[in-house]
Amino acid sequence: NAGVMQNPRHLVRRRGQEARLRCSPMKGHSHVYWYRQLPEEGLKFMVYLQKENIIDESGMPKERFSAEFPKEGPSILRIQQVVRGDSAAYFCASSPFYSLNTEAFFGQGTRLTVV
Amino acid sequence: KNQVEQSPQSLIILEGKNCTLQCNYTVSPFSNLRWYKQDTGRGPVSLTIMTFSENTKSNGRYTATLDADTKQSSLHITASQLSDSASYICVVSEEGTSYGKLTFGQGTILTVHP
């Protein structure tokens, strides 16, 4: 049973380009969470999704950022018109169901660098 | 504002020694507290998770304590190994919120020297 898979591991984009980050949850997990880790800072919640539904996107910037978790395929975090401040590590976690005490498993992250 | 503060920011110890990392939080109402280990360039890996009613939990050489009254937690590492070198992150969950809304501390960077 493979863990949470994120790709690419590293992504370089020029200012104004689009970045697409992918997350395949662990087998049997239908809940996905995205977090952002800025340099020298702790992880910050962005969005919580279940299959085909966004449950909580209160941590997502209002513009340029979007997330989806389709019925088939990985969850996608999309950043349009990237700016230098978007440079960060983006982590995805998954869990089999929602519970406050449920363990979630993290992927290895995608490091986005905007040049 | 919910906050999680960790100390020290960084720590260097010799292999075989013990160490204790601290975490203070202001998250309320409290649901649970977790300690994660994050190796450089990797995602966080769970070490322990404690609810309000638990005041200590062990996972091998890692022992976490929780004082919900003073809102403090500690992570004690016994007989450190070189592979313990990593960032240790304290994470607190707020009751009544979705799972994803965890508050993360900035982490303590532990370096174990031979």
Image (cartoon, coloured by chain):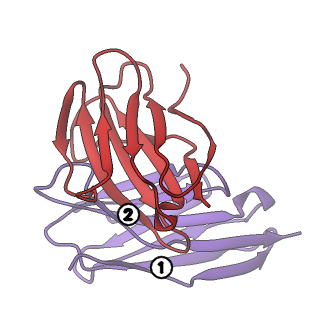
The residue pinned by badge 1 equals: B22
Instruction: Identify whether A56 is placed above or below B4.
Output: above
Of A46 and A98, which appears nearest the observer? A46
Q: Colour of chain A?
A: red
Task: Name the residue rendered at 56%, 57% in the picture.
Answer: B37
Q: Is residue A91 visible?
A: yes
Q: Colour of chain B?
A: purple
Q: Estimate how packed mark 1 is, as few (under 14), some (14 to 19) or many (20 or more) residues with alpha carbons within 10 Å.
A: some
Name the spot of residue A15 as percent of width and height, x first. 52, 58
Task: Name the residue rendered at 66%, 63% in the picture.
Answer: B86
Q: Chain of mark 1?
A: B
Q: Nearer the viewer, mark 2 or mark 1?
A: 2
The residue pinned by badge 2 equals: B91
Q: Is residue B54 visible?
A: no
Residue lying at the far top in this picture: please name it.
A72
Q: Estimate how packed mark 2 is, as few (under 14), some (14 to 19) or many (20 or more) residues with alpha carbons within 10 Å.
A: many
Task: Name the residue rendered at 66%, 53% in the picture.
Answer: B41
Image quadrant in which you'd find residue B102: bottom left
Of B105 and B48, which appears nearest the observer? B105
Image quadrant in which you'd find residue B15: bottom right
Task: Name the residue rendered at 77%, 60% in the picture.
Answer: B81
- Give the amino acid type for the residue marked by disc 1 in the picture: Gln
Left or right, A91 with respect to B110, comes to left
Name the spot of residue B34 as percent of width and height, x first. 39, 58
- Give the amino acid type for the residue marked by disc 2 in the picture: Val
**Distance between the alpha carbons at the discs numbered 2 and 1:** 12 Å
Of A87 and B48, which appears nearest the observer? A87
Instruction: Identify whether B65 is placed above or below B95.
Output: below
Left or right, A80 with respect to A51, comes to right
In the rendered view of the protein, which quadrant contains the C terminus of chain A?
bottom right
Name the spot of residue B65 as percent of width and height, x first. 41, 69
